[in-house]
Amino acid sequence: MIRFLSLLLFSTSLLQAAKPNVLFIIVDDLTANALGCYGDATAKTPNIDKLCGSSVRFTRAYCQYPICGASRASFLSGRYPETIRVLGNTTRPLAHAKDSVFIPSWLRQQGYHSIGIGKIFHEGEGHTPPEQWDVFHEGKPKSKRENALAAERIKKPYAERGLEWAALAPGDDLSGDIIKADAAIEELQKLKNQPKPFFLAVGFKKPHVPYCAPQRYFDLHPLEGAKLPIEPADCLKNVPEAAITHEADARGASELSKREALRAYRACVSCTDDQIGRLLAALEASGHAENTLILFTSDHGYHLNDHRGMWHKMSLFDASARVPLLIHAPGIAAGTCERPVQLIDLFPTICDLTETPAHATLEGRSLVPLLHDPRMKSATPAHTLVRREQTKIIGRSVSTGEYRYIEWNDGKQGTQLYDSRQDPNEWRNLTNEPTQAQKKETMAKKLLRP
């Protein structure tokens, strides 16, 4: 009897080990427009580009809410923001939809060893629901300069926050993301003897403001190469006031200040890319690479002085709503998918690829069919929502791959319609053009409404 139980436990261990591991990489405030594999010729992102070479790259992946807390609560639960009623950074993920489950705890219930490092859920007390992790590392920076800039920024009223940045000098350049990578590498080394499959989520903070990175990454991006977008003078023609989210830092900053900030942003992206390279090398050295699913994304997009000076996020323009998304799955060929997908699709996709049951509350769809055939026809649109805190105006957008349509307060505060193929930068709002009336009506019917 004892021998039988031992064999049973051993067989169960083998079955668990056969399940693929999951490495989930989340980068804060990263626009796809700053990556080489998404077409930025000035980017210095060799490690992300290399990962792209063995992944399915999604060119039209969209977040469900373009701010950290709401987006993360949404995709980690696989539910829309209005379902879980998290519409900002202050509401905790389980404040309202208490029946929600989240990727780390769900996989943990299915027998996975769950490890979290850095910013996965939004930062702050109570934002990470209990029982998510077997192991967690916060990974705070040790750089005095980086910590001081972050502390100063938090103390300022929102309207007075600027485009703060710093090139960290040798001796004070141990940034948070380097510490996070160190912790992740250490955990991978420990996993060599772990009988369970693992879920390892690593959340890199940069390029979130303040833009801080060691000087060596600034050296990769000379200031003369920091070019601000060149746009038509009338690119905001007919655009509703609610659509614009200029920040005080962008309105008052000089062109030189903006170029310095852009350089600093790109330096941060290169620093994060370097840490991702270290992480992937450690995964290879651990012996788990061939049986590990890798997902790489951001919580939302980011404006870099486009649309006449917009910075940061919190808009429904493509630059803010669209995210980079790479999925590397063992046995699945690399490719490019141009169909619209959503971040809430990640939870059911992970369940599908790990052969674990999908929780009944999930609202996304598995992307596995698109992984196997990235060119397959798919009529499922992507939805993004945002709410203006001061005015409580709500904007809703829908993206079909061919067009993007946006309404503010059900159209009472304005609408926007863009031809995504002919006008990817969204410089020409077609909403008032008579020839587009039918398309506008069709797109309006696709909006996700409560």
Image (cartoon, rainbow, N blue to C red):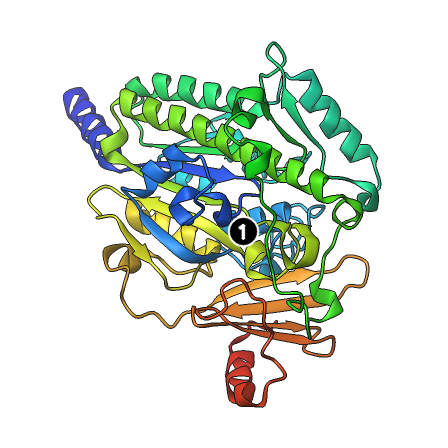
Whether residue 358 can be seen here: no
In which quadrant of the rendered image does the N terminus lie?
Answer: top left
Crowding near pointer 1: few (<14 within 10 Å), some, many (20+)?
Answer: many
Q: Which of 48 and 393 is in front in this view?
A: 48
Q: Seen in the image, is 378 located left or right of residue 387?
A: left
Q: In the structure shown, which secondary structural element does the residue marked by tag 1 occupy? A: loop
Residue in the picture at 68% in, 78% down: 411
The quadrant holding residue 164 is: top right
Percent x, y of residue 184: 44, 23
> As displayed, is residue 196 above or below residue 169?
below
Q: Name the residue under label 1.
A: 100
Splitting the image into 4 quarters, where does residue 143 fall? Answer: top right
Q: Position of residue 360 (x, y in %)?
A: 43, 58
Q: Residue at horizontal 45%, vertical 32%?
A: 273
**31 is higher (above) or lower (below) than 270:** below
Q: Nearer the viewer, residue 345 or 1?
A: 345
- Left or right: residue 125 versus residue 335 is right
Residue 331 shows in this picture: yes
Residue type at numbered disc 1: Ser
The residue at the point 43 percent across, 72 percent down is 402
